[in-house]
Image: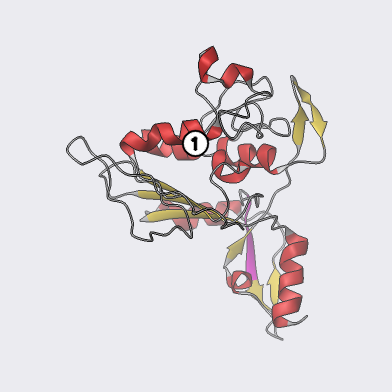
Amino acid sequence: MTMWTTSRRRWLVFAALGAAAMVGAPTALAQGSGNDGAATSSAGDRTSKVREAVQSGKAKNVILFIGDGMGESEITAARNYAKGAAGRLAMDEFPLTGDYTIYAVQKNAPSKPEYVTDSAASGTGWATGTKTYNGAISVDAHGKPVPSILENAKRDGYRTGNVSTAEVEDATPAVQGTHVVERACKGPESMEKCPGNAKENGGEGSIAEQLVQTQRTCCWVVARSTSTRPCRPASSKARPCRTRLMPPGIRR
């Protein structure tokens, strides 16, 4: 889906390529080349070098790509398959790369870790900066909604987008703009695990309902839709945007 929110010329765009999240890079390591052309990683934390490099500049756009289950082992497998053991992927040529580990926590007990993390908890982690339990969509360990970076950017006047090749109710795209206590609560007919989020109980509704509620101020274009034309930003003078859903039968 694609969401256009304001008329200002700054952009923050999130592309979720599937359902699982790839972690970001708060700590950076510099990459160089050895005498044989192979990339090497310098020792130590290079975060200060990254900060020095960007402090004097200003980004025109920020685009975050989230790979589907894309960890180090998947990247290595792709490199070996596509380029061979001594080959390099395009991402290997980035001047700075980094990674971090993530874990979930137990519901109502944030001091107790869950070492196996699902895409809802990990997505909530990188989207909101809050560790939570498996299945949670942008709520903390006690079920309280926490704002995402996309919502914060929209609040600050940036034009934002959320593009997904999976269903828009999947956990990874959902964490950027919805808040429910269980990822299974995708539509109003599946709210058994999220009674407090249900509209009839005074909540904001299911994932799908929360996404639809933004329609008055934005447009949604689902990847592989029958229409590929971008929506115009909505304003008080513009016509309401129309929703374009993925045709039946088209799946990942």
Residue at the spot 35% in from the left edge and 45% down from the top edge: 219
Q: Percent from the top left, x then y, of residue 250?
A: 56, 58
The reply to whether residue 7 is visible in this rendering is: yes
Residue at the spot 41% in from the left edge and 39% down from the top edge: 153
Q: Which residues are magenta?
A: 27-31
- Horizontal relation, residue 73 to residue 175: left or right: right
Q: Which residue is situated farthest in the front direction here?
A: 248
Residue for badge 1: 177
**Mark 1 burial class by Cα count in 10 Å: few <14, some 14-19, many 20+:** some
The one of 225 and 144 positioned closer to us in this rendering: 225
Residue at the spot 74% in from the left edge and 77% down from the top edge: 81
The one of 211 and 100 positioned closer to us in this rendering: 211
Dominant secondary structure (helix, strand or loop) of the stretch shown in magenta: strand
What amino acid type should be assigned to the residue bearing mark 1?
Gly
User: Does residue 28 show up magenta in the picture?
Assistant: yes
Q: Percent from the top left, x then y, of residue 111?
A: 77, 24
Q: Is residue 143 above or below residue 82?
A: above
